[in-house]
């Protein structure tokens, strides 16, 4: 899955995206000008291949929302958690509405799915996670993320839980350093792993491992670890969906070598699709260097990430359910003066 440079495809990008090793495109704020442009870009990407390439984005809400102007500005996941502490039923309703609004607007634009929700716990340690987490309590995270995923499914969008087995317990930001979590597996099993354990069987179509070393099982980051992906995620938890690597451009991924070495290590560990988001030479290196044998099971898993159905923005605007859901979600937005302006995190966080 490759990142592209701008708001429309360049000739060289079209050529590389037709390479059989490429399976999708991930979009960022740099790829968005307005809704009409985004729809045209997605149509042009889908027209390159048959079956079409997947198109994904990080549209969590809060600090990590790539498309804003012309889209509903979504609250950070933590706002649902704050509401949950006051009114559990309303929080579940709002989370489902948030997932539906986000997904319905993506489908109206031609995007297939979002890398959401975040299933990490807010332990007050990780600044890169922080308010991207629903709550500190794994039971609350499970309930709110489950509601958010139900809303996404209602709109025809598959969910991807991240960052397995948990990024919330380490202070280092994996975009810039290699975080190491020295907690025991029992500590992880009783807390950070709970949302994944409860949601992977029936709710999640995809999972993204963290570029975090959890020493209790492996000295390699989880995204490069067969112990975490093949043995724990697939074996112990029974996950049968798509495993996406986190961005191979991130500093914590450099332990895998050059871009091709990182891609091969992630695939060998059990990832189905690897992401190269911001380095076009890395995209070319991986696309041309991968010699992956056809795998019908992997192909079928990836195909299930394709978006289903769509209402246009015009149809959404006249839809009473949509208008009601937007009001519900917008009511959770804090006043602008209290917003968090971590632009470096908002642009780069995965």
Image (spheres, helix red, strand yellow):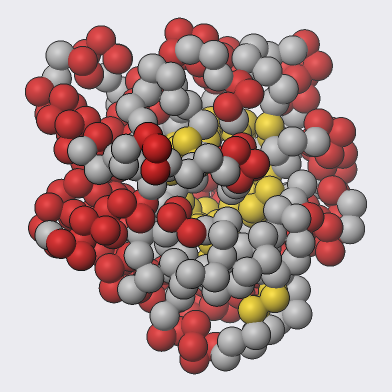
Residue 10 in view (yes/no): yes
Left or right side of 267 for 186: left
Count the marks: how many? 0
- Residue at the image point whose x is 55% and y is 88% from the top: 185
Residue 93 spot, x, y in % from top left: 15, 49
Residue 201 in view (yes/no): no
Residue 99 spot, x, y in % from top left: 30, 42
Q: Is 338 drawn above or below residue 316 in the view shown?
A: below
- Residue at the image point whose x is 56% and y is 59% from the top: 127
Residue 348 spot, x, y in % from top left: 64, 42
Left or right side of 312 for 42: right
Q: Is 32 drawn above or below residue 287 in the view shown?
A: above
Residue 67 spot, x, y in % from top left: 47, 26
Residue furthest to the front: 337
- Residue at the image point whose x is 44% and y is 67% from the top: 122
- Residue at the image point whose x is 80% and y is 36% from the top: 279
Q: Is 15 drawn above or below residue 207 in the view shown?
A: above
**Residue in front for this viewpoint, 60 or 263:** 60
Q: Is 209 drawn above or below residue 185 in the view shown?
A: above
**Residue in front for this viewpoint, 278 or 285:** 278
**Residue in front for this viewpoint, 290 or 166:** 166
Quarter of the picture containing the N terminus is top right
């Amino acid at each position: 899955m490759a990142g592209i440079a701008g708001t429309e495809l360049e000739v060289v990008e079209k050529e590389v995206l037709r390479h059989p090793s490429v399976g999708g495109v991930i979009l960022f704020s740099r790829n968005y000008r307005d809704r009409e442009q985004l729809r045209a870009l997605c149509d042009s990407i889908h027209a390159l291949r048959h079956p079409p390439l997947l198109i994904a984005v990080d549209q969590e809400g809060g600090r990590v929302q790539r498309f804003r102007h012309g889209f509903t500005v979504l609250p950070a996941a933590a706002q649902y958690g704050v509401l949950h502490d006051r009114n559990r039923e309303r929080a579940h309703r709002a989370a489902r509405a948030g997932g539906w609004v986000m997904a319905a607007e993506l489908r109206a634009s031609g995007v297939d799915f979002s890398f959401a929700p975040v299933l990490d716990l807010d332990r007050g340690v990780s600044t890169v996670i922080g308010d991207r987490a629903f709550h500190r309590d794994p039971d609350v995270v499970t309930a709110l993320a489950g509601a958010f995923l139900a809303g996404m499914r209602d709109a025809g969008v598959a969910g991807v839980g991240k960052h397995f087995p948990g990024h919330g317990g380490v202070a280092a930001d994996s975009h810039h350093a290699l975080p190491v979590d020295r907690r025991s597996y029992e500590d992880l099993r009783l807390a950070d792993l709970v949302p994944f354990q409860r949601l992977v069987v029936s709710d999640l179509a995809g999972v993204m491992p963290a570029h975090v070393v959890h020493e209790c099982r492996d000295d390699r980051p989880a995204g490069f670890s067969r112990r975490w992906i093949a043995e724990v995620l697939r074996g112990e938890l029974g996950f049968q969906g798509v495993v996406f690597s986190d961005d191979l451009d991130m500093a914590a991924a450099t332990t895998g070598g050059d871009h091709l070495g990182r891609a091969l290590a992630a695939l060998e560990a059990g990832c189905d699709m690897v992401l190269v988001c911001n380095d076009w030479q890395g995209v070319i290196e991986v696309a041309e260097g991968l010699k992956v044998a056809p795998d019908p099971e992997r192909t079928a898993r990836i195909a299930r990430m394709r978006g289903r159905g769509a209402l246009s923005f015009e149809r959404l605007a006249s839809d009473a359910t949509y208008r009601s859901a937007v009001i519900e979600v917008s009511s959770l937005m804090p006043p602008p003066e209290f917003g968090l302006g971590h632009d470096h995190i908002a642009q780069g966080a995965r």
